[in-house]
Image (cartoon, rainbow, N blue to C red):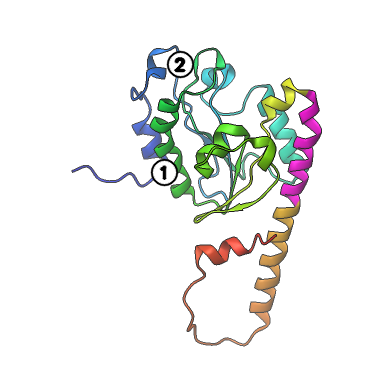
């Protein structure tokens, strides 16, 4: 019986020449696993690699990636701080939408990435990432900019940067989404700082309560 994978490096190595779905035979250059801080508190999840991502082996390095970088700067984040991955690890031909079989084949690996990184906040970019992580059919135009408190993390859907580049009317709503994201992150930071300050001022007492649960951690993002 094989041992369970315990690190992102091991998981990436296991997918290096993945042949589990037809995308392996439909022109992909390489598997685009993910990149960033393996201990990130914030993770971004997109749809699938495009041409530039397929060539470089890194998500969001084309025009949509440049826009994402600009938006990250607006909220005080850098790519070095976060982790970025896609639902689908291989480029679909001509950047078409993923097929349901492809999503179901790749989804377990995305969930393993999330479980290994343990982010408190996951930002889903566009329809496919949002529907995959919410596990229900819902249009991104209805749910973007809202926080969903799931069992293991807070999900914050965002419009996809590529869609905003193709449809100029989406660009300002995308910027507005990132402003809401900044407010959410600021609230979390203030809550954590307040708790830390209160703890430092309190007299030391024996710990009689259990460690903070995942659900309580999520409350730090309270809306």
Residue at x 61% of width, y 51% of height: 148
Q: Among all residues in the image, which is located at the extreme left?
A: 1
The verdict on residue 87 being magenta is no
Figure quadrant of the C terminus:
bottom right
Residue underneath mark 2: 28
Counting from the top left corner in percent of width and height, residue 147 is at 65, 51
Foreground pick, 183 / 150 = 150
Residue underneath mark 1: 112
The verdict on residue 178 being magenta is yes
Foreground pick, 80 / 171 = 171
Residue at x 49% of width, y 18% of height: 92
Q: Report if residue 157 is visible in the image.
A: yes
Of helix, strand and loop, which one carries label 2? loop
How crowded pointer 2 is (Cα within 10 Å; few <14, some 14-19, many 20+) is rated as many
Counting from the top left corner in percent of width and height, residue 113 is at 45, 42
Residue at x 66% of width, y 31% of height: 160
Residue 3, above or below 168: below
Foreground pick, 74 / 142 = 142
The image quarter in which residue 171 lies? top right
Foreground pick, 17 / 110 = 110
Residue stretch rendered in magenta on the structure: 168-182
């Amino acid at each position: 019986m094989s041992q369970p994978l315990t690190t992102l490096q091991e998981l990436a190595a296991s997918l290096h020449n993945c042949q589990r779905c037809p995308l392996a035979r439909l022109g992909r250059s390489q598997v685009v696993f993910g990149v960033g801080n393996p201990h990130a508190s914030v993770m971004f999840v997109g749809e699938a690699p495009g041409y530039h991502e397929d060539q470089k082996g890194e998500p969001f390095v084309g025009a949509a990636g440049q826009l994402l970088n600009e938006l990250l700067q607006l909220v005080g984040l850098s790519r070095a701080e976060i982790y970025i991955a896609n639902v689908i690890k291989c480029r679909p031909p001509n950047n078409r939408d993923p097929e349901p079989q492809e999503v179901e084949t790749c989804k377990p690996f995305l969930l393993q990435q999330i479980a290994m990184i343990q982010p408190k906040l996951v930002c889903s970019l566009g329809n496919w990432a949002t529907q995959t992580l919410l596990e229900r059919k819902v249009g991104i135009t209805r749910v973007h900019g809202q926080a969903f408190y799931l069992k293991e993390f807070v999900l914050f859907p965002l419009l996809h940067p590529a869609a905003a580049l193709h449809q100029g009317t989406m660009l300002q709503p995308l910027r507005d989404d990132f402003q809401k994201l900044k407010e959410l992150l600021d609230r979390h930071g203030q809550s954590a700082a307040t708790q830390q300050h209160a703890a430092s001022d309190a007299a030391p007492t024996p710990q009689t309560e259990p460690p903070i649960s995942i659900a309580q951690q999520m409350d730090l993002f309270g809306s």
